[in-house]
């Protein structure tokens, strides 16, 4: 991971795990956050220790696990005060008892003390039995916590520990981590900035069951959307067909064809500062779309499909204050072809990469070419890492423009 461009590497959170059978799932949450670069300090309540060992969390986080408020006063640690200086307090799973204690502000255990001492946002992921969740006492405590700014994730519905079905399942790890990332990023350098990202390929129908498509996975676009959220941006994803899960905390617009994508992006860029076209848009579509499934008996000699050109979305969308970023997947003359694209489509930045190596792969080896400046040759890296580097350069473009606008405004005042 290129840590200097990973905003999560500078973040520290407290993960409080309380006494629910779902406590074992908190290990996955801790592990995922650590892998993203976040420093995770775990508080394990007495109840949680009946379900899972401190060793699980100390091994995953490579940090001591906390529990006893007195033992936490050491030469290095000022007890709950050190923990309270975290960027976020996440309680997952949060039992009915924990929600009540947090709502009342009880401070006779470490989590209670940290929750009162901290000025960081509180995020709770409840898990309990259906009746406990719906009890007015639990709902009143939640209402109070929400009023004070706490963010509540889930719970989901489905099979509960008793074997019965109902509400009260701990939210999935992906959702807990997604919301946590968005909360950690919210005051980042792109806070208040709207970013539109396209992802995936397009499907151009021949008839109701057949289409012309491409091998794009959507990985690059979705990684860019997540990287933008990590920097505080308000993100809209316009996604073609993909099986990957969408980032939490983004507006998601699903499309199928290039024409649909153009239409949706035209709407989405209203009020946006940045458009990143990571989608592999189909350049051609069948001139004719059969209303019914085309039968092979219709034509014994085969079928000729005439293709016509799709609109070029990036070239079509023009807005004076919109920073446009494009991709150039080429098989030869990478830099020259990418530069030509930069000019033809009036882009501020183009990401050039080897088409054969990058499409459908987890990794990419890219060259970044900005409007002014030398090409920046990057080493091969995972697409999630490349997304962080691209968003770092995009942030520079946004802040430089902000700077020059302020300078113009100041000039005006003289
Ligand atoms: O011209 P070429 O397809 O190589 O350009 C690639 C860039 O243009 C990508 O950023 C892609 O998302 C965008 N594009 C587009 N509309 C098209 C084709 C490509 O916006 N019809």
Image: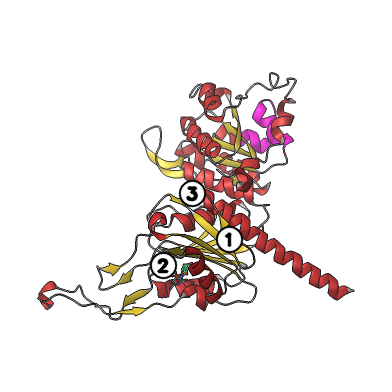
| C-alpha separation, residue under disc 2 versus residue under disc 3 | 30 Å
How many badges with numbers are in the image? 3
Q: Earlier in the sequence, mark 3 or mark 1?
A: 1
Q: 53 and 108: which one is in front?
A: 53
Residue 109, relative to residue 408: is it above or below?
Answer: above
How packed is label 2: few (under 14 Cα within 10 Å), some, or many (20 or more)? many
Give the structural element (helix, strand or loop) at label 1: loop
Query: Going from the N terminus, do you reach mark 1 or mark 2 first?
Result: 2
* Residue that badge 3 annotates: 380
31 versus 147 height, above or below: above
Question: Disc 1 designates what residue?
Answer: 375
What residue is rendered at 72% in x and 65% in y?
402
| Residue span colored magenta | 100-118
Q: Quadrant of the N terminus?
A: top right
- According to the image, label 2 marks what residue? 255
Which residue is painted at 50% across and 56% down in the image? 366
Q: Main secondary structure of the magenta part?
A: helix
State yes or no: discs 2 and 3 in contact (Cβ < 8 Å). no
Q: Residues within 10 Å of mark 1 (few under 14, many from 20)?
A: some
- Marks 3/1 in contact by CB < 8 Å: the verdict is no
């Amino acid at each position: 991971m290129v840590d200097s461009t990973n905003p999560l590497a500078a973040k520290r959170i407290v993960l409080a795990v309380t006494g629910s059978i779902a406590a074992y799932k908190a290990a996955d949450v801790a592990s995922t956050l650590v892998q993203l670069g976040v420093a995770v300090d775990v508080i394990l309540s007495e109840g949680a220790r009946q379900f899972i060992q401190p060793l699980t969390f100390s091994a995953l986080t490579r940090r001591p696990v906390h529990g006893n408020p007195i033992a936490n006063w050491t030469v290095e640690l000022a007890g709950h005060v050190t923990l309270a200086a975290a960027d976020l307090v996440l309680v997952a799973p949060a039992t009915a008892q924990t929600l009540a204690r947090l709502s009342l502000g009880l401070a006779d255990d470490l989590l209670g003390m940290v929750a009162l001492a901290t000025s960081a946002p509180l995020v709770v992921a409840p898990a309990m039995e259906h009746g406990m969740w719906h009890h007015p006492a639990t709902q009143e405590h939640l209402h109070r916590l929400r009023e004070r700014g706490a963010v509540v994730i889930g719970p989901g519905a489905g099979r509960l520990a008793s074997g019965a079905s109902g509400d009260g399942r701990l939210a999935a790890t992906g959702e807990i981590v997604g919301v946590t990332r968005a909360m950690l990023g919210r005051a980042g350098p792109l806070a208040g900035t709207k970013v539109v990202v396209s992802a995936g390929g397009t499907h151009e129908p021949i008839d109701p069951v057949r289409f012309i498509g491409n091998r794009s996975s959507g990985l690059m676009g979705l990684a860019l959307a997540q990287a933008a959220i990590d920097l505080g941006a308000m993100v809209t994803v316009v996604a073609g067909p993909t099986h990957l899960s969408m980032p939490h905390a983004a507006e998601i617009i699903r499309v199928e064809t290039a024409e649909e994508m153009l239409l949706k992006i035209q709407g989405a860029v209203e009020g946006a500062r940045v458009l990143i076209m990571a989608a592999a848009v189909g350049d051609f579509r069948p001139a004719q779309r059969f209303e019914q499934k085309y039968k092979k008996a219709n034509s014994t000699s085969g079928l000729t499909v005439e293709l016509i050109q799709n609109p070029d979305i990036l070239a079509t969308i023009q807005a004076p204050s919109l920073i446009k970023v494009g991709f150039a997947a080429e098989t030869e003359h990478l830099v020259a072809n990418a530069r030509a694209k930069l000019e033809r489509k009036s882009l501020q930045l183009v990401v050039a990469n080897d088409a054969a190596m990058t499409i459908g792969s987890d990794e990419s080896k890219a060259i970044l070419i900005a409007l002014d400046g030398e090409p920046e040759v990057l080493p091969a890296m995972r697409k999630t890492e490349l997304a962080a580097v691209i968003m770092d350069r995009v942030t520079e473009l946004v802040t430089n423009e902000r700077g020059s606008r302020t300078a113009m405004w100041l000039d005006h005042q003289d």
